[in-house]
Image: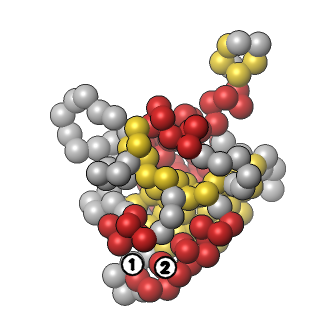
Amino acid sequence: MNVHTSVSEHTSVQDAITTLNITGDLNLGMIVRSASLFGISHFHTLHKYDNEKEKIIKLLTEFSNMYTLIFLEQHPHSVPLVDFRRRVPQNKPVMFIVGNEGVGIPRDILNHIPGIIVEIPQKGVGRSHNVSNSLSILLWEYYRTDFIVEDSIV
């Protein structure tokens, strides 16, 4: 169910990424690459949600005690990407959670586990961005202030 991997020995933050039911090598590879580029220290993959629902919910509940959970999902209670950063408490690391492109993050997780649900606004045609691209956009928005040097972005 849970594969835990340290992304890099040279990470700069204690934040984490968790994927739910994402199995494609390309998406997982791009997600791990983004995690490494942003200095994220931990990466978790959770599979077989339908078969291990209770275990996964229990694990995510435990994670919510250690991290501020940030779910990337289209949801009636989501906050726009540009507004979410100010809602994140600074007293503990964050865990970014993304779901399968077909079904996303299951509603019972979003409705019962505390966290911030973030949505990337869209203007064009289509349901959503690719999951790995979406996560990269979210990571950039979260960490971009770390790259500000003398009033300019590096």
The residue type indicated by label 1 comes to Tyr
**Residue 37 falls in which quadrant of the image?**
top right
| Residue 151 seen in the figure | yes
Relative side of 6 to 120, left or right: right
Q: Residue at x 49, y 73 (%)?
A: 46
Q: Residue at x 27, y 60 (%)?
A: 102
Residue 28 percent location from the top left of the image = 49, 58
Relative side of 136 to 9, left or right: left
Residue 150: image tag: none
Q: Residue at x 65, y 69 (%)?
A: 65
Residue 51 percent location from the top left of the image = 37, 87
Above or below, comparing residue 49 to residue 45 in the picture = below
Q: Quadrant of the C terminus?
A: top right
The answer for how far apart the CA atoms under marks 1 and 2 are is 7 Å
| Residue 21 seen in the figure | no
Instruction: Using the image as rendered, state which of residue 107 and residue 34 is in the foreground.
Output: 107
Q: Given contact means CB atoms under 8 Å apart, are the residues at marks 1 and 2 in contact? A: yes
User: Residue at label 2?
Assistant: 56
Relative side of 41 to 35, left or right: right
The residue type indicated by label 2 comes to Ile
User: Residue at label 1?
Assistant: 49
Relative side of 53 to 114, left or right: left
Q: Residues within 10 Å of mark 2 (few under 14, many from 20)?
A: many
